[in-house]
Image: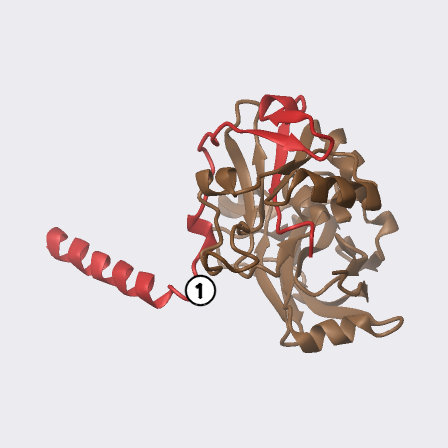
Chain colours: A red, B brown
Amino acid sequence: MRQLLLTAALVLTLAVGVGAQDMPNVDQFGPQVGDVVPAFSLSDQTGQNRTLPSIMGPNGTMLVFSRSADW
Amino acid sequence: MELQSRYADITAQGLGLAVITYDSVDTLEGFSNARGIEFPVLSDEGSVVIKEYDLLNREQAPGVRFYGIPYPGTFILDTEGRVTERFFEQAYQERFTVSSIMVALGEAADGTDRNATRLTTDHLEALAYPTDRTVAPGNRFSLVVDVAPKEGMHVYAPGGHTYQVISLRLDTPDFIRAHDVTYPASEIYHYEPLDERVEVFEQPFQLVQEVTIQMTREIAGLAAEPDATLTVEGVLTYQACDDAICYTPVELPVKWPLDWRPLVR
């Protein structure tokens, strides 16, 4: 019975997955609550190199992924 | 840019702030100078980090201009780099306002300067205000009600009982989508005569109703009209009791007046 339920759940997941292809559910993308995010090293607008530790405040940080600044 | 105007509030919470886009350093330098941006805006040309974070927008095909943009959103990280909260919108045109994120993070919201409406009944005092005075199409922001039950009164929180839970019902036009109301942790009221324990609010508490304004050409046009305003209306429903009496349920009309902000491209 449990096996049958699992199969049913899987089929349902697949069906939802296909149906949602045009409009992906953004909740599934990217690091989730509890995950440690990947390290990075990027240049900021002044040419200074920035990493996760360098953008931290005493309680953490707000990291915003944005569309382009150009449009 | 909204982030710049809230930068001081963000740092006051002990948080750092950085934005990542796929633009070149030159583009970001010009943008930051033009807008007076004081926090780091990071250049992820080639979208390497965006891909590494699994945030590449899959609706944009390689070769077209916008290939490489991320699904826009905000992470709150602890000092170890662990995600404590994430705010992502379904449609790429939609985004959380910073003020709404700050309220969700538990910032003591202050209704005094935000088009607040004060409501008084026999049982409670309430202050209704939006997290943002001006809103743009695509914004996800919050309608807040601060409720202070009067001395000896309590209202009912969600829980395993049949009393009428305090709730908010919005009467919104089609272009405003209401999300679920966020309730704070409740208290337990012990009614000794029946030895009954019920989830209630006796101390001041806050209800937060997030809403998203849809982004359509029509709504953008509406927001661009001179002096355009928008009023969201709703009804706060509750039943209040004290140690002796349970009063008749109340339906209290609530309004959140807002100004439109046209989209800046």
**How many neighbours does mark 1 have within 10 angstroms: few (below 14), some (14-19), or many (20 or more)?**
few
Residue B251 shows in the view:
no
> Which residue is labeled 1 in the image?
A23
Camera-side residue of B252 and B26: B26
For the point 66% across and 35% down, the residue is B18
Residue B131: x and y, percent?
A: 75, 52
Residue B158: x and y, percent?
A: 53, 52
Q: Quadrant of the C terminus of chain B?
A: bottom right
* Chain of the residue where label 1 is placed in the rendered structure: A
Camera-side residue of B17 and B133: B17
Residue B65: x and y, percent?
A: 57, 58
Q: Amino acid at mark 1?
A: Met
Residue B44: x and y, percent?
A: 57, 39
How many numbered marks does the figure carry? 1
| Left or right of residue B251: residue A28 | left
Residue B159 vs B228, above or below: the answer is: above
Residue B156 shows in the view:
yes
Camera-side residue of B78 and A20: A20
| Image-quadrant location for residue B8 | top right
| Left or right of residue B32: residue B104 | left
Residue B132 vs B136, above or below: the answer is: above
For the point 86% across and 48% down, the residue is B112
Residue B250 vs A2, above or below: the answer is: below
Instruction: Identify the element where label 1 is drawn.
Output: loop
For the point 64% across and 42% down, the residue is B24
